[in-house]
Image: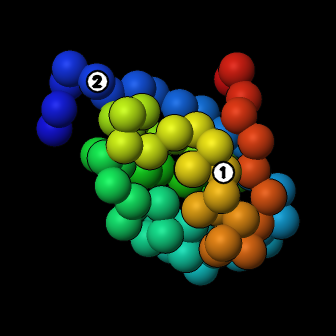
Amino acid sequence: MSTQNTTHTLLRAEGFSCPSCVNKIEKRVGKMQGVDNVKVHFASSRIEVDHDETQSSVDDLVEAVAKAGYTARPSAF
């Protein structure tokens, strides 16, 4: 894990309704360049991502979630 450039990003997601949706998002985002950790919280519709912003920006993360078939946006909490 590259602690130098690691950013912790929180996304609020919409559109997933089953636990298998969690796996789809975690797999899609987890494959991205610079992503160290992905945790999808099904009950609260939150996605936490530890990533290197120089390799994967917040916009890239939102786009990856969209490619998995869901809507996400940056969230403060």
Which amino acid, by three-letter code, is at mark 2? Asn
Farthest residue in the bottom direction? 20
For this view, does 33 lie left or right of residue 3?
right
Q: Position of residue 60 (x, y in %)?
A: 57, 50
Q: Residues within 10 Å of mark 2 (few under 14, many from 20)?
A: few
Q: Residues within 10 Å of mark 1 (few under 14, many from 20)?
A: many
Task: Name the foreground residue: 41 vs 9.
Answer: 9
Q: Is residue 43 visible?
A: yes
Q: CA distance from mark 1 to mark 2?
A: 19 Å
Q: Position of residue 10 (x, y in %)?
A: 59, 33
Q: Tell me the element at label 1.
A: helix
Which residue is at 53% across, 31% downward?
A: 9
Which residue is at 64% across, 43% downward?
A: 59
Q: Is residue 37 visible?
A: no
Residue, disc 2: 5
Q: Is residue 66 above or below residue 48?
A: below
Q: Tell me the element at label 2.
A: loop
Residue, disc 1: 62
